[in-house]
Image (cartoon, grey):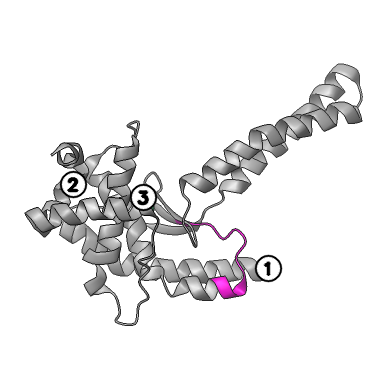
């Protein structure tokens, strides 16, 4: 398939960045991220496969109970039920990790940099490839936070997200910039939320120096109230 070979070529480009920047981050922040993979983010597929299962379950149920497949009206109601569940589930997946341009996500459990290829044109592959230094570092920065704070299982507040996102932006947009090739394209046009988070982190570094970056994942609550 053309699409999947294009995807694996793109994932290889991310993997190159992972291999290049991971040792620097691990060294500077005293963490171990492990063997980080680059993988496609299949959130929509996961939702769809859950719904595929519910279709076949309904089928089986009707055959077991009535000895025939579901009636058209039962089937139609079932599809409607799915849409009602599907819409918010899909919106959650999209908006929670929403980026203005393209979407990548860090997965600490695997650990991996995940990228959504949903709706990409040939031109998108080309365009996005130019930003991979910054974006890959951004996602790994979430991994650095998670290693320092060990807060994966906590319930996270809006303020946590703000600091966490700001930390990732500061590392990728500012701190690691010196390590990128000179012609790397750096995105600076972020949402208000992201810029606010980045500013919080910038203020801490301006006040306390670059070493204080390490303490942010564990001390952000204290910094937030000071
Ligand atoms: Zn992020």
Query: Looking at the image, do the residues carrying marks 1 and 3 touch, with CB atoms under 8 Å apart?
Result: no
Q: Residue at x 34, y 59 (%)?
A: 138
Closest to the observer, 201 or 86: 201
How far is the residue under mark 1 from the one under mark 3?
39 Å
Task: Find the magenta span and give its range.
Answer: 114-124
At label 1, counting other C-alpha atoms closer than 10 Å, the crowd grade (few under 14, some 14-19, many 20 or more) is few
Q: Residue at x 58, y 38 (%)?
A: 89
Q: Residue at x 41, y 58 (%)?
A: 37
At label 3, counting other C-alpha atoms closer than 10 Å, the crowd grade (few under 14, some 14-19, many 20 or more) is few
Residue 47 relative to residue 143: left or right: right
Q: Looking at the figure, which quarter contains the C terminus?
A: top left
Residue 123 place in picture, x, y as percent: 58, 75
Residue 118 place in picture, x, y as percent: 60, 58
Q: Quick one: label 1 or label 2, which is nearer the N terminus?
A: 1
Residue 151 relative to residue 120: left or right: left
Q: Is residue 119 magenta?
A: yes
Q: Which numbered mark, 1 or 2, is in the foreground of this view?
A: 2
Local SS, label 1? loop
Q: Quadrant of residue 79?
A: top right
Vertical comparison of 223 with 69: above or below: below
Circle number at residue 216: 2
Question: Is residue 149 among what the camera can see?
Answer: yes
Circle number at residue 193: 3
Q: Quick one: label 1 or label 3, which is nearer the N terminus?
A: 1
Residue 110 place in picture, x, y as percent: 41, 48
| Label 1 sits on residue | 1
Q: Is residue 220 magenta?
A: no
At label 2, counting other C-alpha atoms closer than 10 Å, the crowd grade (few under 14, some 14-19, many 20 or more) is many
Question: Is residue 35 among what the camera can see?
Answer: no
Q: Quick one: label 3 or label 2, which is nearer the N terminus?
A: 3
């Amino acid at each position: 398939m053309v699409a999947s070979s294009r995807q694996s070529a793109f994932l290889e480009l991310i993997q190159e960045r992972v291999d290049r920047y991971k040792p620097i981050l691990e060294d500077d922040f005293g963490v171990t991220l492990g063997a980080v993979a680059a993988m496609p983010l299949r959130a929509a597929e996961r939702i769809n496969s859950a719904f595929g299962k519910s279709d076949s379950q309904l089928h089986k149920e009707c055959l077991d109970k009535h000895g025939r497949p579901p009636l058209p009206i039962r089937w139609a109601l079932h599809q409607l039920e799915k849409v009602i569940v599907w819409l918010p589930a899909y919106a959650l997946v999209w908006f929670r990790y929403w980026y203005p341009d393209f979407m990548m996500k860090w997965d600490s459990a695997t650990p991996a940099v995940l990228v959504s290829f949903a709706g990409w044109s040939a031109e998108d592959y080309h365009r996005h490839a130019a930003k991979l230094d910054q974006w890959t570092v951004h996602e790994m920065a979430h991994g650095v936070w998670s290693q320092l704070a060990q807060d994966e299982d906590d319930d996270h507040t809006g303020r946590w997200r703000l600091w966490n996102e700001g930390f990732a932006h500061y590392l990728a947009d500012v701190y690691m910039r010196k390590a990128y090739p000179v012609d790397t394209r750096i995105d600076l046009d972020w949402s208000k939320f992201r810029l606010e988070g980045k500013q919080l982190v910038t203020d801490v570094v301006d006040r306390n120096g670059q070493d204080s970056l390490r303490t942010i994942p564990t001390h952000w609550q204290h910094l937030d109230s000071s």
